[in-house]
Image (tube, rainbow, N blue to C red):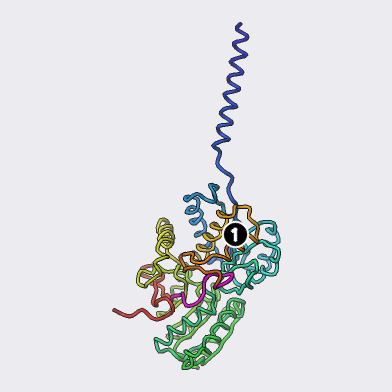
Amino acid sequence: MLRERKVFSTLGMAFAALALTAAGAAYAAPEPVNLNVILPLTGGASFVGQSSQQAIKLEQEVINKHGGINGRPVHFIFHDDQTSPQVAVQLVNQLSKVNVILGSEITAMCNAMAPLLSKGPFVYCLSPGIHPKPGSNMFGVMVPISDMAPQVLTFFRAKGWTRVALMASTDASGQDGFNAFMAAFKLPENKGMTIVKEAHFNPTALNVSAQMTDISAAKPQAIIAWTTGAPAGTVLKGYAQAGLTMPLVIGQGNIAPEFMKQYSAVLPKALYLPGGLGVVRADNIKVDPRMKAPREVYLAALDKDKLVPQNGYEVVWDPIMLTVQALRKLGPDATSKQIHDYLSAIQGYAGISGVYDFKKYPNRGLGGARDVITHWDANKGEFVAVSEIGGKPIARK
């Protein structure tokens, strides 16, 4: 009898253990949805990539707080392209079996990746400098430089700066900017404006003293120097060493507090950077009311970690939210084509950078005059809009 009781006791304990195991399995955390991100975490554009990585981690918290993807948490896996097109290509080949990739973030890297995508995966390039073919498996972000350049000249015209020097680095993003501004100067509204000097420089150059000497001799009223990262720092140093004082515009990729602080000793007083609405709080300009809710979420996420709006944050925010929306609708195992087709049909999606219309602006969603001109406010420690949307200077009160 005693032996039978022991047997039943042992069996009871075993069944209890099995029940607890089953209950634990029932309440186990759901498997995460892994999304792969390619960023320049090291190399010449590392400050851009690292700031975007920081924003993506914040965005992951926001997405998972609101249910992830159909109840499964999102987990971003980061891959470093080292600011190298060759490495970016290697990473795409390694990830060829996944359905979606976010990145890279620099024009040259995305251009190198694009030919590999005819059969997938779907890639949301985080650079506004690319020109994806409609229908292709690569999307670009924000307003293209071809639409941004005329807005810069709108700002210049209103200021009376009609004699302009145009300078650019010889890499892909620099030349894309150079070509966009050359085209913008030819627009009818800019017929009274003149390029008094053109200049180019290698992004690996240690100084641009010769170019700045030539620009100074041409007596421009303003300078546009389109480049990003370390080459932009070289431009700022050359500008200061040449003793120049006229207004200077540099590329939107430099809208980062870390960049401003690194080169604080040589920052011009009249330094301007065009950018999207996600690089400013926009509390001094009128913004489409449909964007109020997403912008509040974005700014609250930054404020929680005592961060300020900047380019590296803006370029990732809307593309990730759009991609997550697609995967919530289609399921995390959706094919590259399904993701592409879903996003291509979106109209009226309100983000932090604008209201998206992928039918009007294929493979990008945004276009036209949607940018602002910004200035670094060292006292506030953030960028502020000095123009309305479209480039018209904010009227002084």
- Three-letter code, disc 1: Val
Residue 94 visible here:
yes
Magenta stretch? 360-372
Residue 350 falls inside the magenta stretch: no
Taking depth in this image into account, of 322 and 397 the one nearest to the observer is 322
Taking depth in this image into account, of 255 and 146 the one nearest to the observer is 146
Tag 1's secondary structure?
strand
Write the residue at 59% across / 57% down. 78
**Crowding at label 1, few (<14), some or many (≥20) Cα neighbours within 10 Å?**
many
User: What is the chief secondary structure element of the magenta stretch?
Assistant: loop
Residue underneath mark 1: 37
Write the residue at 55% across / 82% down. 180
Residue 44 visible here:
no
Residue 361 falls inside the magenta stretch: yes
Image coordinates of residue 289 in percent, x first then y, are 39, 67
Image coordinates of residue 30 in percent, x first then y, are 57, 43
Taking depth in this image into account, of 224 and 236 the one nearest to the observer is 224
Q: Quadrant of the N terminus?
A: top right
